[in-house]
Image (spheres, rainbow, N blue to C red):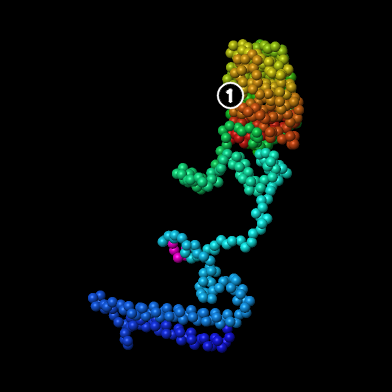
Amino acid sequence: MPPERRKRMKPDRRAAARPNRKSRLRPDRRARAGPGGPPRKAAPSSQRKPPARAGAAAAAVAVAAAAEEERRLRQRNRLALEEDKPAVERCLEELVFGDVEDDEDALLRRLRGPRVQGHEDSGDSEGEHEAKDNFPTQKKPVWVDEEDEDEEMVDMMNNRFRKNMMKNASESKLSKDNLRKRLKEEFQHAMGGVPAWADTNKRKTSSDDESEEDEDDLLQRTGNFISTSASLPRGILKMKNCQHANAERPTTARISSVQFHPCAQVVMVAGLDNAVSLFQVDGKTNPKIQSIYLERFPIFKACFSANGEEVLATSTHSKVLYVYDMLAGKLIPVHQVRGLKEKIVRSFEVSPDGSFLLINGIAGYLHLLSVKTKELIGSMKINGMVAASTFSSDSKKIYASSGDGEVYVWDVNARKCLNRFVDEGSLYGLSIATSRNGQYVACGSNCGVVNIYSQDSCLQETNPKPIKAIMNLVTGVTSLTFNPTTEILAIASEKTKEAVRLVHLPSCTVFSNFPVVKKKNISHVHTMDFSPRSGYFALGNEKGKALMYRLHHYSDF
């Protein structure tokens, strides 16, 4: 604006503003004070006069006149500025802001945008109203690309994941919307329906509120909320390689026996180095407790008694049976058993109840001895030679595998043969084992096949069929061991390196993660055993190492 116009306009503003101030102040002064003295006191309620309405009306008229005068000044200033603007600028303003010659408030309303009028609660605050007024409205796009409206087709044939979602050959190409719907259908099919968290139409019920409260309570606590299953899952056996059981007494001689103590957390290791060693099992260092050396007595087999108070040991070339009393610390040799005419005593079994000792003799003889007195009770004879034998879990029956591929079942008390059957597909039996729950009988043959039978069928049928034939080994199965819970069957062959497998029961499937073939640290396995509660698994090889593993599914020793 030119300077002369500003000078010309300033006196008018002052002149227009002064009368208004006086007009607004006069009624207040009259009300508060007298014409020349202190403020008047309020009169009693009986003497008060009604307020004068003429003064209030005059004040309102004065305010309205001042507002009108202000509007006229703003209009005059705008017209003066318009005269100085070029025509191009005025045309551009009309295009952008519209024609607002009459009212500038219309321009402000247009810039602010239309307000959404609707039913408002009477309890809304002024801040909420201002937020609603300032909320920008959704505007239309300035321009639209026609190519965006065309549906882009997705090739389903070149992607192997999308190819599986095709329902017929005509769906070689799908639009993006149809592909999104198909992916949604696949997800719901995999989840078994719409997940609860994704269902927007689901109405909350009282049970839902209670579940939300339970979830809140769950998130406020810490701890292990994942509990292990009571039964052993198949597929992968979680286990850890521990320190060797005989690490504190290393040897290069073959390990012939490894067995865990039935009561204490102790493991026994015996081998061809004429020694029987006891170690404390902790999985870290396995400290040595004691070693018993037997001169010129390479140990063929060593075993704990049922109560764990004695250790029985036999040699590869002697008929002497050594008994080590662990409580008294005495080594007792049994040179001759009255009535026993065997020249060499090697393979033997101890009954689970601790009453009997079974010695496998030559020419098909089985000799039953008393553990307490070490005297002969009776003998049993089978056809061919005795390959292996074992007691049933109740110590009332004996299962014997012959070199002819037959299995004999004997009654212990009557020493009578109850049943005899041919092990299916076996030409020469090598090993046999029974489960502790009295459910299974496992027979290993020279061809590497392990047949798992039901004990009831072995007693009642003349030609029982195996529940499952395990064919994961290709050489003769020389070792069979059930774990105490009858959930694992360990099978091994001493003819081939790394020839050991763990079979899951009752599925009769082999655990895929054992052994680790790449490491090749197991070598030829000659003996195996599980701890009393299946927490540990140990095996002995021909290199003099008693390998030990921790089974994580079982919490106890």
Quarter occupied by residue 256: top right
**Which element is circle 1 on?**
loop
Q: Is residue 70 above or below residue 381?
A: below
The quarter in which the N terminus is drawn is bottom right
In the displayed structure, does residue 472 sit left or right of residue 33? right
**Label 1 is placed on what type of residue?**
Asn
Specify the farthest residue to the left: 46
Tell me if residue 519 can be seen.
Answer: yes
Number of numbered labels in the structure image:
1
In the displayed structure, does residue 71 sit left or right of residue 173? left
Q: Position of residue 544 (x, y in %)?
A: 73, 31
Q: Residue at x 66, y 52 (%)?
A: 150
Q: Residue at x 63, y 28 (%)?
A: 507
| Magenta stretch: includes residue 125 | yes
Query: To which residue does mark 1 refer?
Result: 437
| Magenta stretch: includes residue 365 | no
Tell me if residue 164 can be seen.
Answer: no
Q: Residue at x 51, y 46 (%)?
A: 201
Q: Nearer the viewer, residue 435 or 508?
A: 508
In the displayed structure, does residue 354 sit left or right of residue 492? left
Q: Which residues are magenta?
A: 124-128
Q: Is residue 475 above or below residue 288?
A: above
Q: Nearer the viewer, residue 58 or 375?
A: 58
Secondary structure that dominates the magenta span: helix
Quarter occupied by residue 148: bottom right
Q: Position of residue 504 (x, y in %)?
A: 64, 29
Q: Residue at x 67, y 30 (%)?
A: 510
Q: Within 10 Å of the Cα at label 1, are there few (<14), some (14-19), or many (20+) other Cα atoms?
A: few
